Image (cartoon, rainbow, N blue to C red):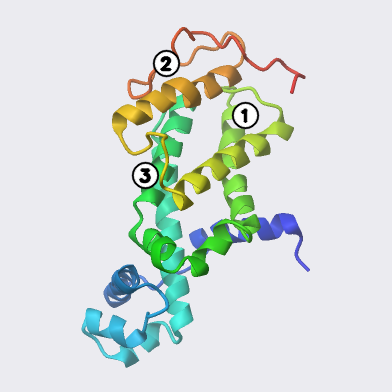
Amino acid sequence: MRSGAAHEHDLLRRAVATELPDDEIASRILGAAAEQAEDFGLRRFTMDDVARRVGVSRVTIYRYFPKKDQLINALLMRELRRFLTKLDTVIEAESTSEAKLVHGVLFCLGFLREHRLLNRLLRTEPELILPYLTTKAGHVVAAARSWIARLIRVEVAEGRIELPDRDIDLLAELLVRTVISLVITPETVLPVDSPRGQQRLVELYLGPVVAALRPTGLVEPADPGVAEPAGAVEPAGAVEPGVS
């Protein structure tokens, strides 16, 4: 039996490691499968419909994906890999911890809230997806928490933020649960969908979080895309060593 720690990593690791057919026909099949699922959901998803969209025979579809479940799984793994790859790119492009946090969270919200297939399932077939984001979300939360915690530990190791190791998973899970909540319940007074509203949220909440975690005396260079919290040049609430 695998340990829980190993199991919680499986979802995202599998998405990154899964080998998908990469020739032109396979790409067209996956693209058509995505369009079919976005237009009609998964309950009415058939291999015949995908074949018609691609313009190939059903036999050709089965040559790449012998079962419908395998095609759907490949599609979901492709979308998850696309999300993770873009997230890593967004974060790696930033030079400060504050910018990494802010732009990483905003990217996640924008990508997931605008994802056509995810929104289709939430709207018309919630029974297929909601359990894995609510009552059965343990593995999803754990996998995402592990992914985010890894990024936070890099910032700690580089000396850009100061946070006891026992608290890293707490911060990571708080971010994960915030994003999930705003995805499955898109109606909100939080202005997450407008640039000006996002900037306000950054000024009030996200920026101060990282400012409070900077090591004493460290002032990161300002990111032109992230407003510095009003009156916070140095982290008045920085975490002191040994204090949690």
Q: Residue at x 33, y 59 (%)?
A: 116
Give percent across and percent down for residue 122: 43, 61
Q: Which residue position is annotated with label 2?
A: 228
Which disc, if any, is residue 203? none
Residue 239 lies, with reference to residue 177, above or below; the image says above
Amino acid type, mark 3? Gly
Disc 2 and disc 1: Cα gap in Å?
23 Å
Quarter residue 132 falls in: bottom right
N-terminal of the two: label 2 or label 1? 1
Q: Which residue position is annotated with label 1?
A: 157
Amino acid type, mark 2? Glu
Quarter placement of the C terminus: top right
Q: On the rendered structure, is 20 left or right of 55? A: right
Determine the secondary structure under disc 2: loop
Give percent across and percent down for residue 163: 66, 26
> In the displayed image of the protein, which residue is found farthest to the left?
55
Tell me if label 1 and label 3 are in contact, CB under 8 Å: no
Determine the secondary structure under disc 3: helix
Q: Which residue position is annotated with label 3?
A: 110
Amino acid type, mark 1? Ala
Quarter placement of the N terminus: bottom right
Q: Nearer the viewer, mark 1 or mark 3?
A: 3
Disc 2 and disc 3: Cα gap in Å?
22 Å
